[in-house]
Structure formats: C-alpha cells, structure tokens
Amino acid sequence: MKIRWMQKIEMFLKEILKKKFAVLGVGSNLRGDDGVGPYISEILSEYNSDSFLSINGDLVPENFTHDLKEFNPNYVLIIDAAFLGKSPGEVELIKANAIKNVSFSSHSMPLSILGKYLEQKIGASIYIMGIQAKSLDFGSDMSEEVKKSADRLIDIFKKELT
C-alpha cells in the first residue's frame, strides 16, 4: 500500500516539475514530526533556480506570500505534517480548494485559507502534501517513519531537478 502512494506522488511531481514550481515547507522543528515541512524545504532550497523555489515557511508561511508572488510559479506545493487517519509517514496530496476531513498541524493561518489566498493572489495551482504525523510532542525528534518518507520525497525531487 505504501508503494502506491509514493508512485502517485512521483508521477505527480514528474509532471508538475516541468513547469515553474515552488515548495513551501510549514511546521516547527521543535515539535517532532511537525518539522517535516521545514526539513524537506531546507534541503530542496539547494536546488533553487529560475524555475524552482523552495522556502521554509516555518510557523508563519503567510509571511512568504510576497516571495511566492514575485517568483510567479505555475504550481505551489505546501508540505506539512497532518492527521490523515493513516499510518505514520504516509502521504496524501490534496488540492488546496478540496481540503476536507484533514487536520494539519496548528499554525497561525489554516493551510486551506492560505492555499485559497495564494491561488487568488498569484494564479497558481496550489496543492498541499500532508504527511501523517506520529508525534508532535514539543522537544521530540522526527519519527523514523516520517523521516523515511521525507527522505524518499527528497530523493524524488532531486532526481527530477537534476
């Protein structure tokens, strides 16, 4: 089952990475699996170019809307820990305007609102990649399951970006 979601993500990324594309990582490194968005976005920022931009939005992703608007991507992928009712580390890709029954880790602005705002402001297609968290306990490390999924996602990005 886990292979299925990764294949779906890989096919999606292969297609959209042909266009101008931005990643916005969201979360806190101080709260276990909530650090998955910043972890992925920090590593991917090494590949920033004229057609790819990766930003660590930390706990205030809305502070980076100007940067995204200036970059003017065709697609934005917001990456965050989520409670999807799945096994830790499983990933779900959701169109921002279709979010239902998903709880993302707490931030100052709900990701559904941020996604809709970005869609209107910059005209890009906005997707949210939720990675099922195991623990968001303050001071804990990222779980092995979530880190393994994050590293697999990073490998897919690297393969497509190089």
Image (spheres, rainbow, N blue to C red):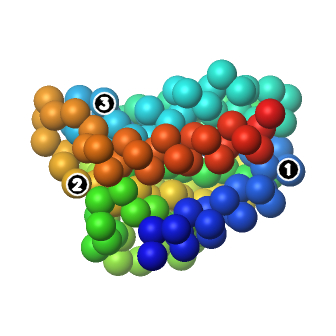
Secondary structure of residue under mark 1? loop
Label 3 Cα crowd, 10 Å radius (few <14 / some 14-19 / many 20+): many
Q: Residue tagged by mark 3?
A: 29
Residue 112 is situated, as x and y percent measured from the top left of the image, at 47, 62
Foreground label between 2 and 3: 2
Answer with left or right where residue 64 lies relative to residue 144.
Answer: right
Give the alpha-carbon distance from disc 1 to disc 2, as whole Å: 33 Å
Give the alpha-carbon distance from disc 1 to disc 3, as whole Å: 30 Å
- Rendering quarter of residue 34: top left
Q: How many marks?
A: 3
Answer with left or right where residue 19 lies relative to residue 2.
Answer: right
Which tag, 1 or 2, sits closer to the chain's start?
1
Give the alpha-carbon distance from disc 2 to disc 3, as whole Å: 14 Å
Which tag, 1 or 3, sits closer to the chain's start?
1
Secondary structure of residue under mark 3? loop
Secondary structure of residue under mark 2? loop
At x 71%, y 56%, the residue is 13
At x 65%, y 47%, the residue is 156
At x 22%, y 54%, the residue is 134
**Looking at the image, residue 139 lies above or below residue 78:** above
Q: Could you tell me the amino acid type at mark 2?
A: Lys
Q: Residue tagged by mark 2?
A: 134
Residue 19 is tagged as 1
Residue 26 is situated, as x and y percent measured from the top left of the image, at 43, 41
Quadrant of image for the N terminus: bottom left
Residue 2 is situated, as x and y percent measured from the top left of the image, at 45, 68
Residue 97 is situated, as x and y percent measured from the top left of the image, at 57, 71
Quadrant of image for the C terminus: top right
Answer with left or right where residue 144 lies relative to residue 69.
Answer: left
Label 2 Cα crowd, 10 Å radius (few <14 / some 14-19 / many 20+): many
